[in-house]
Image (spheres, rainbow, N blue to C red):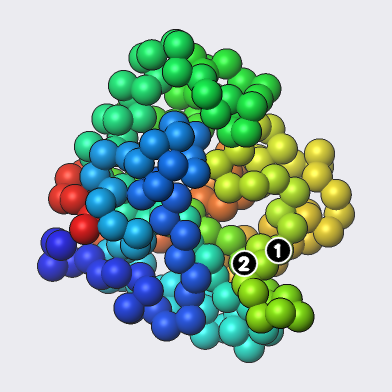
Amino acid sequence: MHEGFVDVALAVPGVVVSARYAGCDNFIGTPVSGYEADKVVVSKPVAAALAAVQAEVSGQGLALKLFDGYRPQRAVDHFMRWIANPNDIKNKATYYPNVAKANLVKLGYLAEKSGHSRGGSVDLTLVRRDDGGTWVELDMGSPWDLFDVRSHAGSTLVDADAQANRKMLADIMLEYGFKPYNEEWWHFTLDPEPYPKTYFNFIIK
């Protein structure tokens, strides 16, 4: 691992990790190139900011759940190869039911260069323990990586409870230096970015 990056589960005690690109539960439906371990890696400045967020939300009985952090450039390249194959739409119904696959880049859901590869962005949500002690995601009105207008941060197509939960997440992230992304309620980027001009490509393992 690059010396400027850490495993978020080790650097931020209490967070929940679900590294979806390391498995098959993602919009491609296969493990993504560059993800060889079930872990989320973040740059050290991002880890420090997340630790502050986690400390605050834990006081409310909540925790951060991270789906993605640093994303190798080879993973982004994998996304672009997938985009170029019009026949591979096996997960369309789950992840982009109302958007043509060919339009995912144009609409801002995917990009040839990602802030994730610079080490400054994270995909996350909030979770709370149920009566059985299991961490359950707060209702955000749409799941992570649903490429749809309902996932836009300010969407009024989701109910009032989901809007309130999105606002709670955005407010706490903004408080600790993260900028939201309009097209995805789960996506935040540390401001200023720690490596604004570098696209890393080391493998997560």
Residue picked out by circle 2: 126
The residue closer to the viewer here, 91 or 184, is 91
Identify the mark at residue 138; answer none if there is no mark.
Answer: 1
Question: Crowding at label 2, few (<14), some or many (≥20) Cα neighbours within 10 Å?
Answer: many
Q: Is residue 193 visible?
A: no
Task: Name the residue rendered at 44%, 50% in the picture.
Answer: 20
Give, as a three-letter code, the residue at label 1.
Leu
Do callouts 1 and 2 mark residues in contact (Cβ within 8 Å)?
yes
| Mark 1 or mark 2, earlier in chain | 2
Q: Picture coordinates of residue 53 (x, y %)?
A: 51, 76
Q: Picture coordinates of residue 2 (x, y %)?
A: 14, 61
Give, as a three-letter code, the residue at label 2.
Leu
Identify the mark at residue 109; answer none if there is no mark.
Answer: none
Alpha carbons under labels 1 and 2: distance apart: 6 Å
Task: Name the residue rendered at 74%, 41% in the picture.
Answer: 155
The residue closer to the viewer here, 118 or 38, is 38
> Could you say whether the residue bearing mark 2 is in a helix, strand or loop?
strand
Q: Picture coordinates of residue 47 (x, y %)?
A: 35, 72
> Could you say whether the residue bearing mark 1 is in a helix, strand or loop?
loop
Task: Name the residue rendered at 75%, 49% in the picture.
Answer: 141
Question: Crowding at label 1, few (<14), some or many (≥20) Cα neighbours within 10 Å?
Answer: some
The answer to whether residue 162 is above or below residue 157 is: below
The residue closer to the viewer here, 162 or 49, is 162
**Which residue lies most toward the right here?**
160
Q: Picture coordinates of residue 204 (x, y %)?
A: 23, 55
Q: Is residue 89 visible?
A: yes
